[in-house]
């Protein structure tokens, strides 16, 4: 994502239409906060669960969504107002910046198109998932082990939904077809630690390659799921985000099952799953640029964070498992598995390209100052203890990270340096 706003130009209001909800679009909206007094966002979404799923993603950014008392389907978080329009889109006039939909038309300043992920939500007809959430909210978050909701998926979207369900006192079960929880954003080591943490706080994870949604058990009002390993689950509802999810063909038409789609606002005239871009006349350079791997926003390093109840994962710059031959990836994990630290830096210049921390809080502004000063990896490790917010981690965690980095750093220097005799020859024959 690239800064295309004019410098020192703060407008009063931005009208943004958002097609598809994802972590990338949520991050971009919060970047707009510094440029506008008010940000009005319109989301096209048919499902009644739109506010719930939006709130789940906002909680993963440590933000709370508040409903507006005087308006239906309108919600507020800081200076951003979200309004849901339950209608399908017919067409988009980019020149006039107007979206035509079944209920009328919507004007916009900026159109943000996210890579939409369609969720299928199965519930029994006696009590939908929306009704269960309403009842659980009134019950003051008391956990009811009978209220099990299965989430099929393995990315941060699925994890965010599970965490949000916990706040309603509902038991979430994540089912994915991988050996561990993974996502586009979390590297696999951090995802493994998050999986252990989720299990500790009450989120079960089941790894399987094939699922079958058999039937509704009418006398108990449960939906039945069977895995390829013959494990049977009984759930109140199923939230499925996977293409590989297999359901009985009659389920969608069954009178005992409610099938709800989330992310189904588009029509054949607009396939929002194929691209992501911010569209309007002044934005000739795409605000979301997938081809450019390294970027900055407003002159600062891009930052991303997720909160898993009390556990925080935060990243700066680019953290990628495929960092390339010219980049070294240093990863440290606490022997007890509670926290982890990752740093990616150039092998030749040692300059930091990305940082991420799981369960390691830093003092506000410390990381930004260190990165803007263009300190190298070795310098950052030497001063890292100055920025740790938790005094216990200064004595218990920092020495372990420093020692581990010192060992790897020496090995990397040895690999990069020429043999001793070549260095002697270069010194004498310059």
Image (cartoon, rainbow, N blue to C red):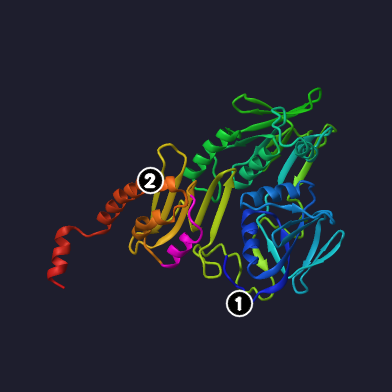
| Of labels 1 and 2, the one closer to you | 2
Residue toward you, 107 or 268? 107
Q: Position of residue 345 (x, y in %)?
A: 39, 58
Residue 158 drawn above or below residue 115: above
Please give the name of the residue rendered at 64% of the width and 64% of the height, measured from the top-left corner.
Answer: 277
Does 363 appear in magenta?
Answer: yes
User: Which tag, 1 or 2, sits closer to the chain's start?
Assistant: 1
Q: Which residues are magenta?
A: 361-373
Mark 1 to mark 2: distance in Å? Answer: 42 Å
Local packing at callout 2 (Cα closer than 10 Å; few below 14, some 14-19, many 20+) is few
Residue 55 drawn above or below residue 169: below
Q: Secondary structure at mark 2?
A: helix
Visible in this render: residue 6?
yes
Quadrant showing the N terminus: bottom right
Residue toward you, 80 or 204? 80
**Image side of residue 426 versus residue 151, left or right:** left
**Residue 373 in which image quadrant:** bottom left
**Image side of residue 329 versus residue 199, left or right:** left
Residue toward you, 389 or 110? 389
Please give the name of the residue rendered at 74% of the width and 60% of the height, measured from the top-left corner.
Answer: 81
Does 203 appear in magenta?
Answer: no
Please give the name of the residue rendered at 61% of the width and 43% of the height, measured from the top-left corner.
Answer: 159
Q: Position of residue 39 (x, y in %)?
A: 71, 65
Q: Are marks 1 and 2 in contact (CB under 8 Å)?
A: no
* Residue at image mark 1: 8
Q: Position of residue 60 (x, y in %)?
A: 62, 49
Which numbered dot is residue 395? 2
């Amino acid at each position: 994502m690239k800064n295309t706003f004019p410098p020192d130009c703060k407008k009063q209001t931005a009208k943004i239409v958002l097609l598809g909800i994802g972590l990338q679009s949520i991050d971009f909206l919060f970047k707009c906060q510094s440029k506008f007094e008010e940000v009005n966002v319109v989301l096209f979404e048919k499902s009644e669960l739109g506010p719930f799923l939006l709130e789940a993603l906002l909680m993963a950014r440590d933000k709370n969504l508040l409903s507006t008392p005087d308006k239906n389907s309108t919600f507020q978080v800081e200076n951003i107002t979200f309004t849901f329009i339950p209608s399908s889109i017919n067409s988009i006039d980019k020149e006039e910046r107007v979206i035509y939909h079944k209920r009328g038309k919507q004007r916009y300043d900026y159109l943000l198109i996210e890579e939409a992920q369609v969720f299928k939500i199965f519930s029994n007809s006696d009590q939908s998932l929306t009704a269960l959430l309403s009842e659980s909210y009134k019950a003051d978050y008391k956990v009811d082990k009978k209220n099990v909701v299965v989430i099929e998926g393995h990315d941060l979207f699925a994890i965010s939904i599970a965490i949000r369900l916990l706040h309603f006192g509902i038991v979430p079960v994540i089912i994915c077809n991988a050996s561990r929880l993974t996502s586009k954003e979390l590297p696999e080591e951090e995802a493994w630690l998050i999986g252990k943490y989720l299990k500790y706080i009450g989120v079960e994870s089941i790894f399987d390659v094939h699922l079958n949604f058999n039937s509704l058990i009418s006398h108990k009002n449960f939906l039945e799921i069977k895995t390829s390993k013959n494990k049977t689950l009984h759930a109140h509802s199923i939230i499925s985000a996977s293409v590989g999810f297999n359901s009985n063909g009659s389920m969608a038409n069954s009178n005992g099952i409610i099938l709800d789609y989330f992310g189904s606002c588009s029509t054949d005239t607009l396939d929002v799953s194929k691209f992501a871009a911010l569209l309007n006349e002044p934005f000739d350079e795409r605000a979301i640029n997938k081809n450019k791997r390294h970027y900055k926003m407003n002159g600062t390093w891009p930052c991303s964070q997720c909160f898993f109840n009390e556990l925080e994962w935060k990243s700066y710059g680019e953290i990628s498992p495929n960092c390339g031959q010219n980049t070294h990836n240093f990863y440290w994990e606490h022997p007890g598995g509670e926290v982890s630290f990752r740093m990616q830096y150039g092998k030749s210049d040692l300059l930091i390209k990305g940082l991420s921390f799981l369960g390691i809080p830093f003092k506000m502004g410390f990381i930004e100052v260190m990165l803007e000063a263009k300190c190298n990896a070795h310098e950052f490790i030497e001063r890292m203890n100055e920025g740790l917010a938790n005094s216990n981690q200064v004595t218990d965690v920092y020495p372990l990270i420093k020692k581990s980095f010192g060992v790897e750093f020496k090995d990397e220097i040895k690999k990069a340096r020429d043999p001793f005799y070549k260095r002697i020859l270069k010194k004498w024959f310059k």
